[in-house]
């Protein structure tokens, strides 16, 4: 599920946008305040940003320029100001598209999908896995949940990746051991238990309790 961050100070507009986007299968996150957009951006780690032009404190041009200093995440401007100079300035600051209010929501969704497709390969992206609100970045081995993030070791990330790829199904201990230690050497089964327990303790650090479930004598599942 792709995260869309909505930077819009009119709660009725941002609420309506969030509701519609969620109905289309996106995870919509609304900016709560408007003087710390970068901090919220870092916390949410969105896949795309919907940026209003006129905001309290600093405008959308400013925040787009700040985001572009360290991120290439797609940004679509949504604004009632349709002057050519605004469009040009937004694009020069790093925006990927500009859509004028009022707009047809199906047009906006089409633009979002097109940008995600071009940026992440919409149909086959494998950098992230999500299940029950938990998000695993398989590239960096980071796990995020409710705005909190932890780093996993290589083996911990492998275990969680396999479990999330088989969500709601039991993964046998033998399958996990084979994936982690493809070797002719004998590996004590207790080694797997130790790694799973370490993973659990780390997940508890971001308030994830009982996420990895033991099926006694068989294996594990999430």
Image: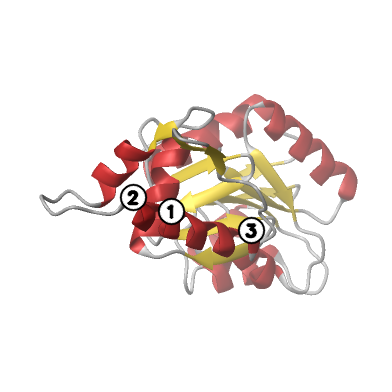
Q: Look at discs 1 and 3 and give the one toward the viewer.
A: 1
Name the foreground residue: 82 vs 22: 22
Assess whether mark 1 and mark 2 are in contact (beta carbons under 8 angstroms): yes
For the point 60% across and 67% down, the residue is: 42
Q: Earlier in the sequence, mark 1 or mark 3?
A: 3
Residue placed under numbered mark 1 in the picture = 193
Separation of residues labelled 3 and 2 (CA atoms)? 38 Å
For the point 63% across and 42% down, the residue is: 99
Q: Earlier in the sequence, mark 3 or mark 2?
A: 3
For the question of whether residue 192 can be seen, the reply is yes
**If the image is split into quadrants, where does the N terminus sit?**
top right
Horizontal and vertical percent position of residue 190: 38, 55
Horizontal and vertical percent position of residue 88: 54, 58
For the point 68% across and 34% down, the residue is: 21
Separation of residues labelled 1 and 3 (CA atoms)? 32 Å
Assess whether mark 3 and mark 1 are in contact (beta carbons under 8 angstroms): no
Count the marks: 3
In the rendered view, tell whether residue 5 sits above or below residue 105. below
Could you tell me which secondary element the residue under label 1 belongs to? helix
Separation of residues labelled 2 and 1 (CA atoms)? 7 Å
Residue placed under numbered mark 2 in the picture = 189
Residue placed under numbered mark 3 in the picture = 44
Outermost residue toward the left in this view: 184
Q: Which mark is residue 22?
A: none
**If the image is split into quadrants, where does the C terminus sit?**
top right
Q: Residues within 10 Å of mark 3 (few under 14, many from 20)?
A: many
In the rendered view, tell whether residue 16 sits above or below residue 195. above
In the rendered view, tell whether residue 87 sits above or below residue 115. below
Horizontal and vertical percent position of residue 206: 65, 62
């Amino acid at each position: 599920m792709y995260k869309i961050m909505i930077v819009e100070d009119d709660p009725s507009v941002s609420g309506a946008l969030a509701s519609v986007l969620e109905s289309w299968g996106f995870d919509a996150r609304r900016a709560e305040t408007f003087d710390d957009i970068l901090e919220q951006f870092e916390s949410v780690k969105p896949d795309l940003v919907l940026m209003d032009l006129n905001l309290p404190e600093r405008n959308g041009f400013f925040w787009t320029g700040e985001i572009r200093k360290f991120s290439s995440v797609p940004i679509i401007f949504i604004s009632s100001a349709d002057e050519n100079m605004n469009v040009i300035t937004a694009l020069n600051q790093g925006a990927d598209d500009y859509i004028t209010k009022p707009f047809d929501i199906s047009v906006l969704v089409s633009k979002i999908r097109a940008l995600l497709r071009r940026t992440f390969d919409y149909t086959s992206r494998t950098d992230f896995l999500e299940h029950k609100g938990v998000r695993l970045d398989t590239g960096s081995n980071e796990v995020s949940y409710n705005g909190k993030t932890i780093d996993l070791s290589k083996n911990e990330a492998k275990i969680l990746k396999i479990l999330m790829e088989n969500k709601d199904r039991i993964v046998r201990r033998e399958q996990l051991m084979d994936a982690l230690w493809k070797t002719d050497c004998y590996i004590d089964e207790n080694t797997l238990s130790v790694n799973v327990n370490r993973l659990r303790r780390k997940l508890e650090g971001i308030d994830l309790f009982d996420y990895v479930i033991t099926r006694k004598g068989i294996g594990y599942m999430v």
